[in-house]
Image: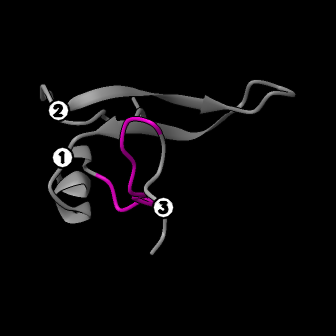
Amino acid sequence: DGQASGPKTTPHLIAYGELRDLADLAPTGRAALLEAPSPAAAAETLGTTGEILPWRFGGRPAKD
């Protein structure tokens, strides 16, 4: 049906959903919050090669 599948079902998936343009509500991508030991593990769980960013509750970690 042309729809991309979502991430694997896991208790580590905190939130997952579609992003939409504010002007016309056209789909612009997807976002997910996921607990994972590494970016590679996150990409495997989500089934994506998209951008993976570090995040923790309270926001992104400070850069050293």
Image location (x, y in percent) of residue 55 = 39, 48
Magenta stretch secondary structure, dominant: loop
Q: Residues within 10 Å of mark 1 (few under 14, many from 20)?
A: some
**Label 2 to label 3: alpha-carbon separation:** 23 Å
> Secondary structure under badge 3?
loop
Q: Which mark is residue 45?
A: 1
Q: Would you say the residues marked 3 and 1 are in contact, meaning their CB atoms lie under 8 Å apart?
A: no
Q: Amino acid at mark 1?
A: Thr
- Magenta stretch: includes residue 41: no
First reached walking from the N terminus: tag 3 or tag 1: 1
Q: Which mark is residue 12?
A: 2
Image location (x, y in percent) of residue 33 = 36, 36
- Left or right: where 56 falls relative to 42: right
Q: Residue at x 26, y 56 (%)?
A: 43
Quadrant of the frame with the N terminus = top left
> Secondary structure under badge 2?
loop
Q: Amino acid at mark 3?
A: Ala
- Magenta stretch: includes residue 50: yes
Tell me if I can see residue 47 in this picture: yes
- Left or right: where 13 falls relative to 25: left
Q: Is residue 24 above or below residue 30?
A: above
Q: Which mark is residue 62?
A: 3
First reached walking from the N terminus: tag 2 or tag 3: 2
Q: Nearer the viewer, residue 48 or 55?
A: 55
Q: Which mark is residue 60?
A: none
Q: Which residues are magenta?
A: 48-58
- Left or right: where 54 falls relative to 7: right
